[in-house]
Amino acid sequence: MSYNYRFQRDRSCFYLSSFENDDNITLVTNRFTKRIIRICQWEIGCLSPTGWRKSKRYNDLYTLWIPNDRIDYDILDDFIEWAIACNSCVWVKLNRYTTDHFEDGVLDFCICSDWNFNFDGVSGRTEIGDIEYRLKYVGNISEDDAKMVGAYLNKCLFCINGYDDDIDNILITTIPATVEKQNKPSWKLAEYVADSLNAEFLSATLRSDKPEMKSLSVTDKIKSWRKIYADNQVELSIDIDSLKGKTVIIVDDLYQSGTSMWCYAEYLKSVGASHILGIAMVKSLKDSDNQPN
């Protein structure tokens, strides 16, 4: 078995290369991916006598040298299996429309199971993108489609497994909505994730209808969400004091600019949550909502 791999998907922040040499295996990754590895796959770092080293030639690259006499192939094989799953997803962070509005650490990580459309511009929606569209606009999907949704979400959960090993410390939530709109796909997906992990579901109910945001630019959408939180228009299902120190996973059906998720993460951090992760069923090809911004 060869251990020469390169994991790098278009427009995904996840990057990892593995080089098998005569007397060692060397891993190369970027800062973003190294953070994920050190939390979710920390055992791989223990195989190296030197640990992760910053590249002297490249600004955002780090290397991990594992000599042959330190290789544990069970750990290495599990790591490669994890990396393959991670590379099949889309990892996102702040983009050019949102980077001036948020601090980078507000949302620790966000992972989407796939893109909603294929990149070629011809073959249309991806498999999960087509299901997401029908779930959102038709209102129902087949039993086989539901199983497929579960498989894609479980893939995301597998990639972040180990981020917090204390299930009692994890809360699952989704973007706030009024009671009448809590049957939306994002709520169903979040409830599925909560059931899968046997974790507590944190509902966030809007006290009144939020302004129509579809026509708003990214900047104005952020302003609207921040006003909702500042005006105390969100009622959480648990006491705010109970959020302190928690890891919260925000689940959504579609990640476009990410403003809804980042604003909610910002609010949750402000009231005491320690770590915020995001999971979205699909990532849109667009990074903006409505422009000009």
Image (cartoon, grey):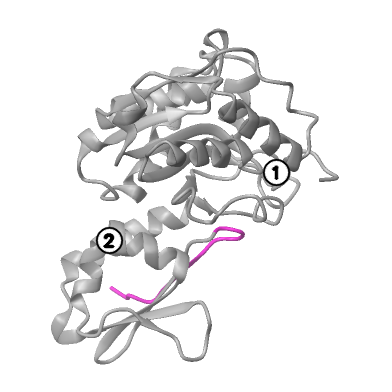
Q: Was residue 7 drawn as part of the magenta stretch in this picture?
A: yes
Who's the residue at 37% across and 40% down the image? Answer: 273
Precedes in sequence: disc 2 or disc 1: 2
Image height of 64 relative to 280, above or below: below
Disc 2 crowd, CA 10 A, few/some/many (<14, 14-19, 20+): many
Q: Was residue 238 drawn as part of the magenta stretch in this picture?
A: no
Q: Quadrant of the C terminus?
A: top right
Image height of 255 relative to 12, above or below: above
Main secondary structure of the magenta stretch: loop
In the picture, residue 96 is in which quadrant? bottom right
In the picture, residue 22 is in which quadrant? bottom left
| Amino acid type, callout 2 | Gln
Q: Which residues are magenta?
A: 1-12
Determine whether the residue tagged by mark 1 lies in a helix, strand or loop.
loop
**Residue picked out by circle 2:** 41
**Number of dots carrying numbers:** 2
Foreground pick, 23 / 257: 257
Q: Which mark is residue 221?
A: none
C-beta proximity under 8 Å, tags 2 and 1? no
In the picture, residue 223 is in which quadrant? top right
| Amino acid type, callout 1 | Ser
- Residue 232 appears left or right of 154: right
Image height of 65 relative to 279, above or below: below
Task: Indicate which label's residue lies in the foreground, 2 or 1.
Answer: 2
Q: Quadrant of the N terminus?
A: bottom left
**Residue picked out by circle 1:** 123
